[in-house]
Every structure is written in structure tokens, then in C-alpha cells.
Image (tube, coloured by chain):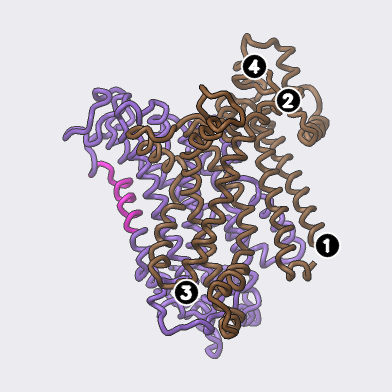
Amino acid sequence: MRYLLRRVGFFLLTLWAALTLNFFLPHFMPGSPINTLRAQTKGRVSDAQLEQILTSFGYKPHANMFSQYFDYLGNMVTGNWGVSLGSSLGTPVSKLIGESLPWTLGLVGVTTVLAFLLGSLIGTIAAWRRGGVVDSVLPSVFVVTSALPYFVVGLFLILFMTIDNTWLPSSGNYDTSIVPGFSPGFVGSVVKYAALPALTLLITSIGGWVLTMRNNMITTLAEDYIRMGRAKGLSDRKVMLNYAARNAFLPNLSGFAMSIGFVLTGAILVEKIFNYPGLGYQLYNAVNSIDYPMMQTLFMLFTVAVLGALLICDLVTVWLDPRTRAKG
Amino acid sequence: MTTLTSADSATPQAPAGTPAPGRRRGRGGVWRSFLSNRKANVGFGMFFVLLVMAVFPSLFTSVSDPTAPARFTPRLTPSGAHWFGTTSLGQDIWALFVYGAREPLIIAVVAGGLATIVSVLVGVSAAYLGGIPDDIISFVTNVVLVIPTFPLVIVLSAYAGKPTLTIMIAVLVVTGWSYGANQMRAQALSLRNRDFLESARVRGERRSYIIVFEMLPTMTSLIIANFLGAALYSVLAAAGLQFLGLGDPNSDSWGTMLYWADSQSALESGTAWWAILPAIGIAVLGVAFALMNYAFDEISNPALRPVRRQRGRKLGTRRRPGSVRTAAIAGGGAGNE
């Protein structure tokens, strides 16, 4: 219990640190956001309106820093994220995020879980058949694929799959001629459009799982209880999955949580290459149009995503591993 | 390697009865294992070719100012004069590629090196100070570790305007040190109470001496592995930033080249090499660091090595769980049988 409280405490403190960083960065970086924005929104909004927009995301040029800071913290927590200053000027940030969140969740969520499970399985088998064909070839292959940048893999997939063959679409999230809804045609189109970005993420992220799982398994396989299991005459399958893999899997869980951060990286680059309208694409657009409220909110959400995943994995580990409970 | 030698010659009075763990490995240990590892050799070979290209670009191409626009006819197909054609801005693609190797290599080595130095300083001092300073340092490290790096790098570069090379490197170091610092702290903690450090303490050596000449040499392979990891991160992150248009658009590097190729629709407009060459370059540089890094994992953790080389060592004779790295170091010579 105390362990969990400490984890929640870490969650809150880190979130606060990230939010604070997020607040002070634009204030102390060279170049005033107000001037940039004034130049950028020239003619489109009046000075008074501009001031109001700035105020709505916690940037009040005339208020003192402390009250600005506390207003900002309050706004971030309550969801008053201000209005976008990008191409859809004046639209609430929360609305834009609501529109793109499902796409990222679908694409990145499904691919991450898939890569994690598939990679762990391959790693388990590779370590179990130590010295076999799988084990000698795979590590090198996966060291290479996990070092490939997302955009390189994406470019090559576009090159081979769409330019020459037009097998799969390389841009967008669904065929716009189909009316969105739960029809087979629409769902099919969503899957088809997600195929290449998903494949890109899968190719680049699976290698890490294979390698860490293989390495954990090799260490675990040296333990006495594995020999014990064998001596008891249990089936190979049972020893491999229930004895070895189960224990080798645990350290991977926290790695899985940490990887959410890397996956978001992938999402930004992959969504940009494939023009996939998720959160990553929003961040790209926000940076290009110097849309501060959008940038701040997205960065906050990404941090919450990583921290949330980390907390959930802690909970799962406590549940699966009695030793962490005992330590409490 | 020089630190290792100086450590040996500087402590002739080390008690003969207790051979310092790790010291045994001597000068050639890590290096020899590196040379006999196939992944390391392939990785180093790739790196070396790129290095030669970056240092002596004029050996590879006669064009000396590749970024100057409109020097040649735009969109030429590959020919004897232009091996990979020209861009839609009238630049020679091969020359762009050759000169473009410089910046990623500088970023890899400088950013990776600085991040590693920060990791070692932070990690080792946290472990050595202990108590409240350790709690504070560790907390900060953990916070930096979990904040999603790439979005932070993007936001930072956006606030910095189009960043110069120096700012880019600074941003990469600020976001890239935490992972290593955690590892260094763990390793230093496990070393803290070893006999050879105890004996140095009894001899009355100063703290700084113990850390620099007694502790760090035993951490060599971890530090190198860390540098390779940090370099890999820097290369990929910098290329990603430049690809998104957050680099200096006038600079000549593979990431910038990809950015221009992408924004000029190189794939669709018949100048595909414009995008393919830098993509291959970034991939090769990344893979080179990843291979060397994995090789160092194998060197410091003998259990991971390809199994054919350790035949005869069956299950059960292995070491305790969780101490593979320390075991490899305490075993000293275990790395180079």
C-alpha cells in the first residue's frame, strides 16, 4: 500500500514538474510569443481579441507571473485549454483534440499492444531454442530494424507499396467518398488506410521487445526453479510459458510503459508522413503555425499518457508479483 | 583506454592479495572483445566508411558547394555526370549526400559524448553522495526520464526558432542524459562497497581520486555502451527534427535533405533518389551505432553471446539473476576467454 502511495506521489510530482516546465518555457525563451502572434494574426484579429486569446491560455501580458502560473495550472487540469491559433483560428483546442484523439488511440494503441505481444512471443521462442536458426538470425535482424528511423521505413513503404503498385493508400485516414459510420465499407477503408502507418510503427518497434524479452528469458532460464520444473517432468511448453516467460515478462511491463513515450515520437513522424490526422499530426501543425495553446496542451497530454501508463504498469506489476507487495 | 593504463601505473602499491576486479581485464580486454565480435565489426565498418566520407568529401565528388541552388538543370535522371540525378532545385544529389554526412556525424559524436559525460557525472555522484542528495538527484533524473522526449524536443526547438547546430546539440543533450544517468547510478551503487574501493579508502585516497581512477575504469564498457546509445538517439532525433522542418533549412545534412525532398514531392516527381539516399544514410549510421551498442551488451553480459562460442557451459553454472552486468565485471577475464 505504501508502495502504491509513493507511486501516486511520484505521478503527481512529475506531472507538476512537467506542467511547470511547460509554462515557463515560452516565457523564458528568446522571442516573445505575443510579438510572433501579433505578426502572425495580423489583420485577422484585433489587438483586444488577441489579448483575450492569450488570456484564455494563461498568458496574460499584464498580470504578474504567479497569478498567471496558477491560472494556467488550473486551466490545464480543468480542461480550459484555450483556443487554437493555427489554421482553424478560434476553434477550442479541446474540440480539435477530441477530433484527432480517436485516430491516434486506434492506430498507435493497437500497434503498440500488437508489437509488444508479438515481440515478447518471438523473444521467448528465440531464447528457448538457444543456438537454433531463429536465435542466430533474429537478434541481428531486430537490432537493425529497431535502429531504423520511422520516416525512413515510412518512405520506403510508400515507395514500394503505393507509387509502383498503388496497393495501399499512403495519405489520409479513410476514403472521403464513403460516409463515416459503422458500415463494412467505412471500417474496411479505415483499416486499409491505417495499414501502412501501422506497419511502419510495427517494424520499428517490435525489435526492441524481441531483444529485451530474449535477454530476460536467457537470464531466467539459468535459474534453479527452471531445472526443478524440468526435473519434475513438466512439459516443455509448460516450463517455457508458466515458469520462464511469466517471470521474464515482468521487467518488460515497466519497459512497456516507458515505450509509450517512444511510440508517441513514432506517432508524430508517422502521422506526418502519412498525413494521418491524429494528435502527432496536430502537434506538427501546431509547431508550424506557432500555435502555443495547442502545443502546450498536446505536450501536457503526452506527459499524462506516459505517466498514466507507468502508473497502470506499476499496479499490474504489484498484482502479478508478490515480491513488490511484500516490499511495500 | 588511456584511463585504464594510467590507473594501472598510478597504483603500484595496490595490495597484491586482492586483485582488483575489472583491472585484470587490463588494457586490451574491452578492445579485444570488440575486435572479435562480428556485430561490432560490421557496425564499425559502416561507421568508418561514413567517417571517411565526412572527413574527405572531395574524394567522393567534384562538386564543392552542393547546396547552392540552380547550378545544374533540375530533375536530371541519373547519368555519368550526375550519378543519382539532380534535385528539382538543380543540385547534384550525390554531392548533397556526401557533404550531408558531416552534420549527422558531428551531432552523433558531440551530443552523444556530452550526454554520456553528464550521465556519468550525475549518476556516479548520486550513488557516491547517497542520502538526501541522492534522493534529489534521482528524483530529477526520473522526472526527465519519463517526460516524453521527442515532443519536448519539438516544443523546445519551436520556441528556439530554427535552431542552429549548437542549439540542436544542446537540446539533444538536455533530453538525452537521463537514461544513462540511471544506469550509471545503479552500476556505481553496486560497486560502492567492493573490496578494491574499500582498500583504496583505507589507503587514504581522496574521493575524487577513487571515483576517477578506481571506479570509472571498471565502468568502461558500460560507459561506451551508453555513448553508443546516446549517439544513436541523437542521430535519430536530430534527423527527425530536420525532417519535420525544425532544423536550419539551409544546412546541409541528411535530415534537411529529406525535408526538402519531402516538401518537393521527390518520390512522385521522378527524383526519388533525393529522398532515398539520405534515408539510406541515416539508416546506415543508426544501424552502425545500434550494432556496436548490441555488441557491447554481449561483451559485458557473456550470457547473451551467440551460443556456439560458449559450448560446454550448460544451464546451472550461470550467475545469480539481476547481477549479470556486475558478474561480468567482477569476473574480470570472463569477457575474453
Q: Which residue is mark 3?
A: B302
- The answer, for residue B187, to whether it is visible in the render is no
- The answer, for residue A52, to whether it is visible in the render is yes
Give the numbered dot on residue A82: 2
- What whole-number distance in Å separates the C-alpha atoms at marks 1 and 4? 51 Å
* Chain containing the residue with disc 3: B
Q: Which residue reaches farthest left?
A: B80
Q: Which residue is mark 1?
A: A2
Q: Please, what secondary structure does the residue beneath circle 3 have?
A: helix
- What whole-number distance in Å separates the C-alpha atoms at marks 2 and 1? 38 Å
* Kind of residue at disc 3: Pro
Q: Please, what secondary structure does the residue beneath circle 1 have?
A: helix
Q: Which residue is mark 4?
A: A38
Q: Which residues are magenta?
A: B44-59
- What whole-number distance in Å separates the C-alpha atoms at marks 2 and 3? 55 Å
- What whole-number distance in Å separates the C-alpha atoms at marks 3 and 4? 61 Å
- What whole-number distance in Å separates the C-alpha atoms at marks 2 and 4? 17 Å
Shade representing chain A: brown
* Kind of residue at disc 2: Gly
* Chain containing the residue with disc 1: A
Sequence-wise first label, 2 or 4? 4
